Amino acid sequence: MATAELTKSDTLIRFREKIGYGFGDMASSMFWKLFGSYLMIFYTDVFGLGAALVGTMFLITRIWDSFFDPVVGIVADRTNTKWGKFRPYILYLALPFGIIGVLTFYTPEFGGTGKLIYAYITYSLMMMIYSAINVPYASLLGVISPDPKDRNVLSTYRMLFAYIGSFIALLLFMPMVNIFSVGHSEQFGWTMSVFVISIACAALFYGCFYLTKERVVPINQKQTKLKDDIKDLFSNKPWWILLGSGISALIFNSIRDGATVYYFKYYVVEDSYSSISFFGIPFVLSGLYLAVGQMANIIGVILAAPISNKIGKKKTYIISMVIATILSIIFYWFDRSQLMMIFLFQILISICAGSIFPLLWSMYADCADYSELRTGNRATGLIFSSSSMSQKFGWALGSAITGWLLGYYGFQANAIQSDQAIHGIKMFLSWLPAIGTILSVIFISVYPLSEVKMKEIITELDEKRK
């Protein structure tokens, strides 16, 4: 059924479907934030690997996995079932996603070499299954509705639920670790905490599957050759621009998130502060800092749609990243005792960061329309896999840089740090992420698909579908 033949009731995106679509990224983000904020310190301080070894592992596994994403997109584009192209992957991979996640945060009784091999295997599998479920999920945005306004709304719901999930995971994770560790080892506490989160993630993915629907069918329903899909993708200039911008933005995020626990453990020395309790649950400063950032991200998501509808996605993106750059640089000079300013700047920077990601997802959908108009071929999965690829590649570079520089600055796990190591830890939350925001602004400044241009593209596509 072509889009033009759908009735008004067929194309209506109901509230329950918006919620259902949001559930998918809520699940993904709960695990993704654990990877970004806790996996590095888990490997160095709990699992027992050197920081430089972990940085190298992150780079190798994530670069490989980044190139695995387009493979998933290609296969998903060629999938045809009664549930559509993309939803079956969410249904069948929800449970394996949770199981592999638990194994990633499990500490086996191996020696140093055995642990390193185990980390490589489990982390590689985790990233691959993340791609296998997240690329089809992201591609859903391009086929739930052909209307750019609907996509903006769905993208907003997606990011809203993503940050809510991240907030819950980051706020409760360390308290759960502390609770499960009582009477057991710290390693057991980490594994059981991830087990609880994995159950929630699987349930959310199932909710996403049952509450969403695929509607958009390409103009040309004949399956194109793979080489043609790849050729079309490589000639898609807006796609390349978003790829570079997305990688740079994720470098910014991954460095800040990955270094946060180190910043509070070794620079602020959060153990010297009394724990803050809510409803009898004690929270640590680093967990509160990360959770506050997620709440601020939600504010950014909410602001993104009305601001971008008024001044455009491109201008909104650039303004947000420029402000984040300035605030990040200032962050370096905060003293460890200036907790109020540290938390205030976390809120402001996170608002800026939160506003750009719904814009990026919406722009990827625009790239699919742009490609379809130019070539007659709609490779939605392949194009959206680039978003996941940039995400993985950006995190790979950011995490590798964090690991390598921790080693370079002389970081020693569970020890009093040297002045040089403290300087490096401070750089991770200031100057280094600012480099990512600057690069992101440079890329997005040449993005060509304005709101006016997209209106013309959608009009032409509608005519061809008729």
Image (cartoon, helix red, strand yellow):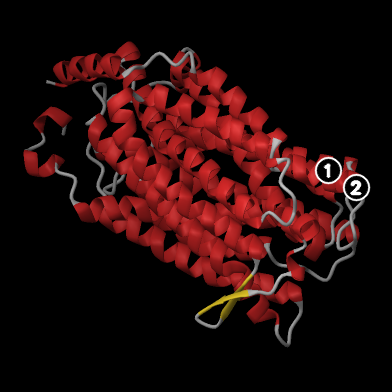
Residue sitting at x 75%, y 75%: 186
Q: Nearer the viewer, residue 89 or 141?
A: 141
**Residue 428 position in % (x across, y down):** 73, 42
Q: Is residue 347 left or right of residue 435?
A: left
Where disc 2 sits, the SS reads helix
The kind of residue tagged 1 is His
Q: Residues within 10 Å of mark 1 (few under 14, many from 20)?
A: some
Specify the label residue 423 is tagged with: 1
Name the image quarter holding residue 331: top right
Residue 375 against residue 131 in the figure, above or below: above
Residue 184 against residue 387 in the figure, above or below: below
Q: Residues within 10 Å of mark 2 (few under 14, many from 20)?
A: few
Residue 344 against residue 400 in the figure, above or below: below
Q: Is residue 378 left or right of residue 52?
A: left
The kind of residue tagged 2 is Asp
In the rendered image, is residue 63 in sight? no
Tell me the quadrant of the picture where the C terminus can be found. top left
**Residue 206 position in % (x across, y down):** 37, 61
Residue sitting at x 74%, y 72%: 187
Q: CA distance from mark 1 to mark 2?
A: 6 Å
**Residue 462 position in % (x across, y down):** 17, 21
Tell me the quadrant of the picture where the N terminus can be found. top left
The residue identified by callout 2 is: 419
Q: Residue furthest bottom?
A: 183
In the rendered image, is residue 207 in sight? yes
Q: Nearer the viewer, residue 346 or 95?
A: 346
Residue sitting at x 29%, y 20%: 451
Do the CB atoms of the residues marked 1 and 2 lie less than 8 Å apart?
A: yes
Residue 23 against residue 372 in the figure, above or below: below
Residue sitting at x 59%, y 68%: 173
Q: Is residue 96 left or right of residue 43?
A: left
Q: Nearer the viewer, residue 409 or 274?
A: 274
